[in-house]
Each structure stands twice: as C-alpha cells, then as structure tokens.
Amino acid sequence: LLATNILGLSLAVFVAGLAMYAVTPASYQATATVRVFPLPADLRSPTVNQKDISMATEVGVATSATVADAAAKDLAWTQGTDALVKNVSVTNPTDSFLLEITYTSETAKGAAAGANAFAAAYLQQRQKLAQDAASSVTKTITAQLADLATKVEATNKLIDGTDLAGASLED
C-alpha cells in the first residue's frame, strides 16, 4: 500500500511537471554590451577621467523612460513602455565601464532585436547629452568672442585716434 501511494504521488508530480513544461512559453535572452566613456562636464577641460562615470546612474539611464520610449519606437512596440521595460535587465560587471543589456523574449530574434534596440537607444541618449553639452559651451564661447570683438574694435579706434572722446582702455 505504501509503495502504491509513493508511486501514485511520484506519477502525479511527474504529470504536473510535464503539464507545466508544456504550458510555459519558450523564453530566449540576448545581451548587448556597451562600453561607457565619460562625457566631460566641462568641454574646455583638457582631461576627462574615466572614474567620473557613475555606472549606477548609467544602469538607470539604460532603463529610463526616455530610452524605453526610443527602444519601443525601434521595435514598433504597442503595449506601453512599462511592459517593455519588464523584459530588459541592465547590469554592470564589477570594476568595469560596461553595461550588459539583456532582453528576454519568446523568440531568439525578438530577444536580439530588444537588446539591440535598448543599446542603440541608450547610445542615442548619451549622444544627445554630449551634443547638448557641446552646444552649451559653443554658445558661451560665441558670446565671449562677440564681447572680445567689441572690445578689440573699441581699442583699435582708440589706437587709430578716431574715437578718443569718452573712451578708455579700461573698458
């Protein structure tokens, strides 16, 4: 009787496991690896230190709404970015400046497309930040150059003696 009960229980567990396996959809993962380079806070600085990067922040950026929105467009995703972000995980291997972006999908092709879409969207976000920083510095330098040009013109007039009234070199 004990052997029959054990055999029956074993058979029931086996059948339950087989049923779970049959109804669980296949799952594939793909990983895209991105090397993170520092973005200079001040583009006029001659040096940028790799240690200036907060990799914890970069992990967060890779799964941010901005990056997820861009990845969703690339993937033609229609279910909302919250559902999309559930399929992605981003890790930073210890002591490295790498992001490993892993995407899970029901197909191998979908997993690869998802990992690549998030990696590309993350890199586009980093490029935008670099372009914004460069634009800001360009505006500042352009304003400084215009101010200097005005001062040079005033100084030249003083030197030429054409505008001696009311001007001084201290301006």
Image (cartoon, helix red, strand yellow):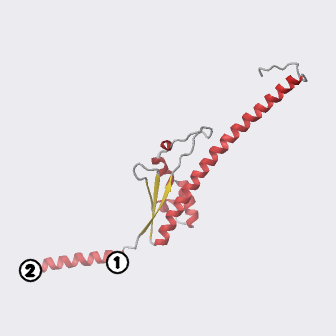
Residue 166 in the image: above or below residue 108: above
Instruction: Please report the residue visible at 41 percent of the width from the left and 48 percent of the height from the top.
Output: 95
Residue nearest the observer in this picture, 134 or 80: 134
Judged left or right of residue 140, residue 70 is left
Q: Are marks 2 and 1 in contact (CB under 8 Å)?
A: no
Q: Of discs 2 and 1, which sits in the foreground?
A: 1
Which image quadrant: the C terminus?
top right
How far across and how far down the image is residue 150, in percent? 80, 30
Quarter holding residue 45: top right
Disc 1 element: helix
Assess disc 2: are there few (<14), some (14-19) or many (≥20) residues with their C-alpha within 10 Å of its C-alpha: few
Judged left or right of residue 101, residue 39 is right
Which image quadrant: the N terminus?
bottom left
Judged left or right of residue 138, residue 112 is left
Residue nearest the observer in this picture, 21 or 129: 129
Disc 2 element: loop
How far across and how far down the image is residue 52, in percent? 50, 42
Q: Which residue is mark 2?
A: 1
Q: Tell me the tag on residue 162.
A: none
Residue 91 in the image: above or below residue 154: below
Instruction: Please report the residue visible at 43 percent of the width from the left and 50 percent of the height from the top.
Output: 96
Q: Spatial distance from mark 2 to mark 1, Cα to Cα?
A: 31 Å
Q: Which residue is mark 1?
A: 22
Judged left or right of residue 137, residue 50 is left
Q: Amino acid at mark 2?
A: Leu
Assess disc 1: are there few (<14), some (14-19) or many (≥20) residues with their C-alpha within 10 Å of its C-alpha: few
Quarter holding residue 87: bottom left
Residue most toward the left? Answer: 1
Residue 70 in the image: above or below residue 109: above
Q: Amino acid at mark 1?
A: Ala
Dot 2 or dot 1, earlier in sequence = 2
Quarter holding residue 41: top right
